[in-house]
Amino acid sequence: EDQVTQSPEALRLQEGESSSLNCSYTVSGLRGLFWYRQDPGKGPEFLFTLYSAGEEKEKERLKATLTKKESFLHITAPKPEDSATYLCAVCHSGGSNYKLTFGKGTLLTVNP
Amino acid sequence: GAVVSQHPSWVICKSGTSVKIECRSLDFQATTMFWYRQFPKQSLMLMATSNEGSKATYEQGVEKDKFLINHASLTLSTLTVTSAHPEDSSFYICSARIDENSPLHFGNGTRLTVT
């Protein structure tokens, strides 16, 4: 069964304390892996797309990396405004073109 | 660019009534839109794929007669929850993409509470 697992479920950091979020997947024919940020009561906001192992993308304090089995979202020197739920989703050949399978997310809290 | 607008942001209705949710792509045309449902601390679950000018494609386990989808134009899709019951209470989110090579962009969701 195709699965997307995110860990940890929740993470508390102090402002400036760098860390990483994990997204592991077991799907056949990965066509793309997506990271989204979701604030409470809002829809997901697109962050990154990764297509192949070894690819990296950066945006401000965030950096996403991809291997054949997992992706990491690295957060460098986080600020309180980075607090949100971070969602990982995969698009795979088992489904239609943009049928994404989402993980449950990691709730990140950054304390000042 | 790629702004998706969803309305209303929240709605409370009585059991047995119907509720319509609108999803608009504001600055691009979307031949395909997607409707998701999200329960607390759970993944986004795809309910159906809305195709402009044709019938929606529903995921397994989603009742097409209960969740009516209409994609009347390239910028508007609607989801109507018919004869709503308390178990339909959830967060409904629509999404769309500019083209097949673009990521999905999501609306801000609709919190439906059925009393």
Image (spheres, rainbow, N blue to C red):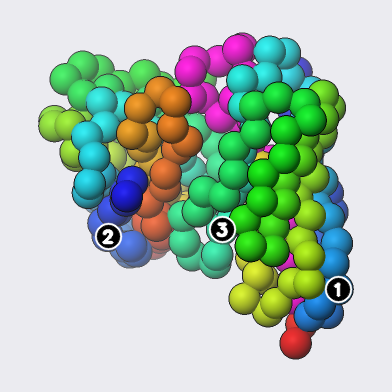
Q: Which amino acid does label 1 sit on?
A: Glu
Residue placed under numbered mark 1 in the picture: A17
Q: Residue at x 56, y 29 (%)?
A: A100
Residue type at mark 3 is Gln
For disc 3, the chain is A
Q: Is residue B64 left or right of residue A21?
A: left
Q: What residue type is labelled 2?
A: Pro
Element on which disc 3 rests: strand
Label 3 with label 1: CB-CB less than 8 Å: no
Query: Is residue A72 visible to the viewer in this orientation of the structure?
Result: yes
Specify few, some or many for label 1: CA neighbours under 10 Å numbering under 14, 14-19, or 20 or more: some
Whether tag 3 and tag 2 are in contact, CB under 8 A, the answer is: no
Which residue appears at 27% of the width and 60% of the height? B8
Relative to B73, B98 lies left or right: right
Q: Which residue is disc 2 drawn over?
A: B8
Residue position for label 3: A38
Is B23 placed above or below B57 here? Answer: below
Question: Which residue is located at x 78 percent, y 65 percent?
Answer: A76
Task: Say which quarter of the image contains residue A75.
Answer: bottom right
Check disc 2 and report its element: helix, strand or loop: loop
Tell which tag, 3 or 1, sits nearer the viewer.
1
Considering the image in quadrants, where does the C terminus of chain B appear?
bottom left
Which label number is shown at residue A107? none
Q: How far apart are marks 1 and 2 (CA)?
A: 38 Å
